[in-house]
Image (cartoon, rainbow, N blue to C red):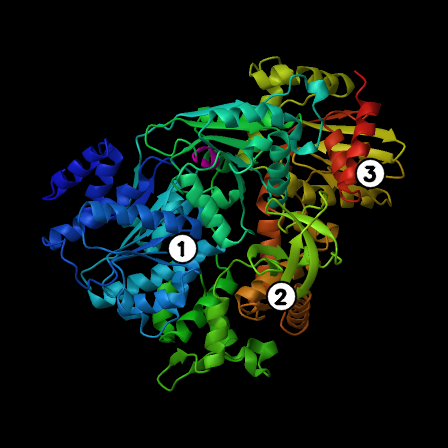
Amino acid sequence: MEHPFYPLIEKWFAVHNRKPFHFQLETWQVYLSGKSGLLNAPTGSGKTLALWIPCLLEYMATHPDYWMPRKNGLQIIWITPLRALAKDLQKNMQAVCDELNIAWQVGLRTADTTSNERQKQKRNMPECLITTPESLHLMLSQKEHAKVFEGLQAIIIDEWHELLGNKRGIQVELALSRLKTIAQLNNKDHTLKIWGVSATIGNLEQAMEVLLGKQTTQGIIIRADIHKSLRIESILPDDVKEFPWVGHLGLKLIPKLIPIIEQSQTTLLFTNTRAQTEIWYQHLLLEAPELAGAIAMHHGSLDRAIREWVEDAIAEGRLKVVVCTSSLDLGVDFSPVETIIQVGSPKGIARFLQRAGRSGHQPGALSKIYFVPSYSLELIESAALQDAVANQLTEERTPLLKPMDVLVQYLVTIAVGDGFYEDQLYNQIRNTYAYSGLTEDEWNWALDFITTGGKSLGAYDEFSKVDIREDGLFYVQSKKTAARHRLSIGTIVSDPVLRLKYLKGSDLGTIEESFVSRLEPGDVFWFGGKNLEYVRIREMTVWVRKATTGKGVIPRWGGSRLSLSSDLSQLIRQKLEEARDGKATQVEFRLLKPLLAVQQQRSLIPAKHELLIEKLESREGYHVFMYPFEGRQVHEVLSALIAYRISKIKPISFSIAMNDYGFELLSDVDIPIEEALEQDLFSTANLLEDIEKSINETEMAKRRFRDIAAIAGLVFMGYPGKNITSKHLQASSQLLFDVFQQYEPENLLVKQAFREVLNLQLEQSRLSQTLHRIHSQQIRITYPRKATPFAFPIMIDRLRQRLSSEKLEDRIAKMQVQVQKW
């Protein structure tokens, strides 16, 4: 590579016993030529250096006295999806500057940044600022923000695949459109460089198109020529007959995990929920008390100081095992981590690869991940994930289009800052991928909404947030409106949370209001590995003391269960066909052989071109089980659709249950499934009409509208420490929804709520594809006398909704004895 300071960089790599990879050299050359693009590289391969080094080389070339401190202003913005990543990035990137003697400062700007630090940055911005989408928008809401960004050279978006396909990604698109315009106004010959950093996804070209908008033709995709070695091993029970068909969270396999943990320097044990994290932490300590002091927990509800302590302790090698959720999924460089354990199926290939990459987080290092099945059939998912890794398969991320709530929030953000002129901002926004199809009518509706509140709310001053000056400038005059808006910037809307504190005053974290509302003084619960007694709630704070009893409940947090991705679903159907034909050679299937033999004996194992339907009668009533293997989310809608279509043949009521593999219809009268199949039960004709009749779409849209209303600024979430209660938020948003439905049915936020229900919650496109696939399949109906291994987990899922965990465990044991007579 030809650059006057490249020998210095090469020497720096040599000091660290490394040489630049080919993809890093290629990225440096492309970046220094002024191009934008997308870097695709596996976790732990040196992605950060691939883009940080050329930022420094560009500066060194134009400032030969690069070691001399000067007020350069902001040169680089580095956007990260997680605050936890920001701290680690800052440390590593600042170390490179210091070791190369480059007088640059790398700063942080997140929700955790103190007001003193923000004021310090305002007086003298660091050369590189690591920030989040929300914090960047907060900067855009400041007066004279263009001066802060006038010298900007590049914007790098880390973990772009995690932002693509959600509203935080839309925030990034809008911010980029603004910053590109500012750069061009300051220097028409200067094109701001935009780079994304992404792990492998199935639609890289589209990911770059979303990132760059109308600059896409100038963009370049660089794929790292590095194959990341990954070893996957399932933790298997000695005998599947002794392993639960369902439930128990894999806890029976803990004795097999202890030796793995002991042999590794540091292990991250991933669960899929915060509640599971709490449970596994307790059971690991019960099984191995010697881990006390060397085991920790990490999830999003723990206090920030606790999480930071855990992150530092991992990096320093002081912890043997950390039980965590997705809070440690991304990018943090924990060199001591040798081993990953995944409890339960992650339900997606990309998520599994992301977690596996937390180990061996160095170029050339081996990543090791152990898969712990929650119940027997999840061993099939383990085998499917191994095939996905071997064939380098991963899912696509579908970008969102025209979310009006994010647009409305952004318009007020810019109006709170320096204001905007209609035509100029419209053209900027149309340059983004998300809003390239924004019509003038939609644009005018958005402007009317922020200035008058729209047709329905025009009589209420609080909804008229933006004023229009005589020269056409849209701006916010009210200081109260501006302050409240800055507090509300962001697109992550969750159930209101309360601070959790000891009576003596130290912070523990946050806990959801919906859980606390069920507690009485004296009740005991587990949090952060501590057994706590609930004392009282006062001023949005839950006060607790250490409990004297060893028993307590596990908090429940909001959020839907993970659902199978379409790619993993397809692999599972393929693996089942291989098992049926005796071609599945993986160790998981050797262990599953007795269970699958029971399935084949009582019913059958379907081939890829077959749909299995089981019909049986029990003391509970008449059951019909169907197994599309398309994931819980699709099955939720499909089961309601099928139930509605059957009810048109014969008046009948159903109880419905589902899991990722199939669903159950239960009735007290015989279900005419044969007759329904003759009437084209899985037809795509009148699909939308039948969906609307089979589910309460309006109620689902109302629930969806709560988040939309919060993002669009229709409801205020409250001041710090004085959050609005969830009941109040829900009531306010539902009232607004009803008003719009009655007086302004064309309201674009209401339309968005219904669109999100169909596209995101009900996965309409995937449902339609599933029906098309089933339509071409051979329907196989069997009539087993007892519940099959496929049916049993679905029946348990139905019971889980109405039984406590202890009662459920007893019930499962009794049912398993009844059906498991081989």
Residue that mark 3 sits on: 666
Q: Where residue 528 is drawn, which disc sits there?
A: none
Q: Position of residue 587 (x, y in %)?
A: 57, 16
- Magenta-drawn segment: 354-358
Q: Position of residue 479 (x, y in %)?
A: 45, 81
Residue that mark 1 sits on: 433
Q: Measuring 44% from the left and 37% from the top, which residue is drawn there?
A: 318
Disc 1 to disc 2: CB gap under 8 Å: no
Quarter placement of the N terminus: top left
Horizontally, is 452 left or right of 813 in the view? left
Q: Measuring 46% from the left and 47% from the top, which residue is drawn there?
A: 309
Under circle 1, the secondary element is loop
Whether residue 502 can be seen here: yes
Residue that mark 2 sits on: 540
Horizontally, is 640 left or right of 195 in the view? right
> Please, what is the three-letter code of the amino acid marked with disc 3?
Leu
Quarter placement of the C terminus: top right
Q: Nearer the viewer, residue 800 or 448?
A: 800
> Please, what is the three-letter code of the amino acid marked with disc 2?
Met
Q: Mark 3 and mark 2: span between their CA atoms? A: 43 Å
Is residue 599 on the magenta stretch? no
Q: Nearer the viewer, residue 211 or 9?
A: 9
Q: Mark 1 and mark 2: span between their CA atoms? A: 41 Å
Q: Mark 3 and mark 1: span between their CA atoms? A: 45 Å
Q: Is residue 60 above or below residue 384?
A: below
Is residue 356 on the magenta stretch? yes
Horizontally, is 197 left or right of 438 in the view? left
Nearest to N terminus: mark 3 or mark 2? 2
Disc 3 to disc 2: CB gap under 8 Å: no
Main SS type for the magenta part? helix
